[in-house]
Amino acid sequence: MQANRLDDWLAVESRLAQAASNNQAAAIDPAHSSGLELLQGALDGPGLNASIGRTLDFRLVEVSHGRAVFQGAPSRDHYNPLGTVHGGWFAALLDSAVGCAVHSTLEAGQSYTTLELKVNYVRALTDRVSRVRAIGEVIHRGRRVATAEARLVGPDDTLYAHATTTCLVIDTEAAA
């Protein structure tokens, strides 16, 4: 099962990279697009691809209303002095997953900021695990506050960490 799931995960990466390189679409206007439209644009190429994903070797691979999935490749470049992947790498993937899960619920003219991120590390990770996924889902979306949770798992469903966040939803038109 693990080999099949990993093959599926690698195929998704390949398909998304190919779609992004072939896409000639105009950039999406954040001021007039919903959060879900912006994130779906990131999957197709012209959307909100953050440079931190290139730096830390992870990317958005799936998004729907209230859900975002990031996939990353742990490497020795991400190691701490103890010889395992640094907790900051875990936190970056989990923060992206919970933040984008919340982002996917925003209407045009809204933004958010993270008020709190809590990460629980439950297992060490090395580059022997070629890919992991951070799967984020909204728990609650109110008018001004949203909460979400995420799990960082390997292809065999091994849990490496989990996180929760609280975000403040902001009307950007009113803030301007």
Image: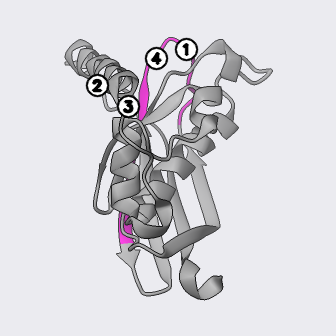
Q: Which residue is found at the position 57% from the left and 18% from the top?
A: 126
Q: Are marks 3 and 4 in contact (CB under 8 Å)?
A: yes
Secondary structure at numbered mark 1: loop
Q: Amino acid at mark 4?
A: Val
Q: Are marks 1 and 3 in contact (CB under 8 Å)?
A: no
- In this picture, which residue range is highlighted in magenta? 123-139
The residue that mark 4 highlights is 129
Mark pair 1, 4: CA separation: 5 Å
Looking at the picture, tell me which residue is in the foreground, 122 or 28: 28
Is residue 49 shown above or below 108? Answer: above
**x%, y% of residue 167?**
55, 72
The residue that mark 3 highlights is 158
Q: Amino acid at mark 3?
A: Thr
Mark pair 1, 2: CA separation: 20 Å
Q: Which residue is found at the position 76% from the left and 21% from the top?
A: 82
Any part of residue 89 in sight:
yes
The residue that mark 1 highlights is 127
Any part of residue 155 in sight:
no
Characterize the local packing of mark 2: few (<14), some (14-19) or many (20 or more) Cα atoms within 10 angstroms.
Answer: some
Looking at the picture, tell me which residue is in the foreground, 161 or 24: 24
- Identify the mark nearer the N-term, 4 or 2: 2
Q: Are marks 1 and 4 in contact (CB under 8 Å)?
A: yes
Quarter of the image where the C terminus is located: bottom right
The answer to whether 1 appears left or right of 144 in the picture is: left
- Identify the mark nearer the N-term, 3 or 4: 4
| Rendered image: mark on residue 12 | 2
